[in-house]
Image (cartoon, grey):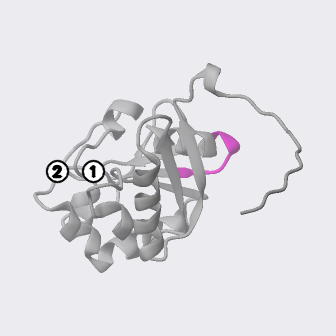
């Protein structure tokens, strides 16, 4: 739901924004934006079976458009690896002010690193207390291994008692 929130925020800034649901394993755009996940979605476009017109306008935000997954493919990775995906992104960037692509989680699935090759950059989302630090490092390592540009990290589900800020100073010395 984080990518959909980002897309909604961009659309409220003005200018048409496109949300592409590229999580072909667990699509959520129909639930989040209240649109139909018909068979003419991203998978049909990447398979060459769909024409223009599968992008739907969100009923909640007039400048937000959604490209749902469509039919869930048997092998999402195969569709992502096709040159058609990069070409689709290039085409949509020329038509919309902002394009936000949602991907499945990076750990354990090869989709996100491949998707990152076709986009300008990635926003890495981390759930507080959701993954061990070594898992976060491994996920970032996977993105860096494909030369993904990571814009930054969004930390979600941080409990108020864990938040805060402070400053300090110190002086120390030591010997061994």
The residue to which callout 1 is attached is 69
Front in this rendered view, residue 176 or 115: 176
- The region drawn magenta spans 12-17
Front in this rendered view, residue 81 or 60: 81
Residue 52: give x, y in percent of width and height. 34, 61
Residue 102: give x, y in percent of width and height. 41, 51
Point out the image quarter for the N terminus. top left
Residue 64: give x, y in percent of width and height. 52, 43
Q: Is residue 62 visible?
A: no
Dot 2: element: loop
Instruction: Name the residue located 81 percent from the left edge and 34 percent from the top edge.
Output: 166
The residue to which callout 2 is attached is 72
In the picture as drawn, the residue positioned furthest to the bottom comes out as: 83
Q: Residues within 10 Å of mark 1 (few under 14, many from 20)?
A: many
Instruction: Name the residue located 37 percent from the left edge and 67 percent from the top edge.
Output: 113
Dot 1: element: loop
Report how far apart the C-alphas of labels 2 and 1 lie in the structure: 7 Å
How many marks the image carries: the answer is: 2
User: On residue 2, which mark appears?
Assistant: none
Point out the image quarter for the C terminus. bottom right
Left or right: 168, with 58 as reference point:
right
Q: Is residue 87 above or below residue 4?
A: below
Q: Is residue 97 magenta?
A: no
Front in this rendered view, residue 140 or 175: 175
Q: Is residue 99 visible?
A: yes
**Are the two marked residues, 2 and 1, in contact with CB atoms closer than 8 angstroms?**
yes
Residue 152: give x, y in percent of width and height. 61, 56
């Amino acid at each position: 739901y984080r990518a959909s929130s980002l897309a909604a925020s961009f659309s409220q800034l003005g200018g048409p924004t496109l949300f592409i649901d590229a999580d072909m394993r667990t699509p959520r755009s129909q639930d989040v934006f209240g649109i139909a996940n018909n068979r003419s979605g991203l998978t049909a476009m990447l398979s060459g079976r769909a024409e223009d017109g599968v992008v739907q306008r969100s009923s909640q935000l007039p400048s937000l458009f959604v490209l749902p997954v469509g039919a869930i493919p048997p092998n999402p990775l195969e569709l992502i690896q096709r040159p058609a995906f990069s070409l689709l992104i290039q085409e949509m960037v020329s038509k919309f002010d902002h394009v936000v692509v949602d991907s499945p989680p990076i750990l354990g699935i090869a989709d996100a690193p491949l998707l990152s090759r076709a986009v300008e950059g990635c926003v890495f989302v981390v759930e507080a207390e959701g993954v061990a630090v070594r898992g976060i490092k491994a996920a970032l390592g996977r993105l860096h291994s494909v030369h993904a540009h990571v814009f930054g990290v969004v930390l979600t589900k941080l409990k108020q008692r864990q938040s805060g800020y402070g400053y300090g100073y110190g002086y120390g010395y030591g010997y061994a």
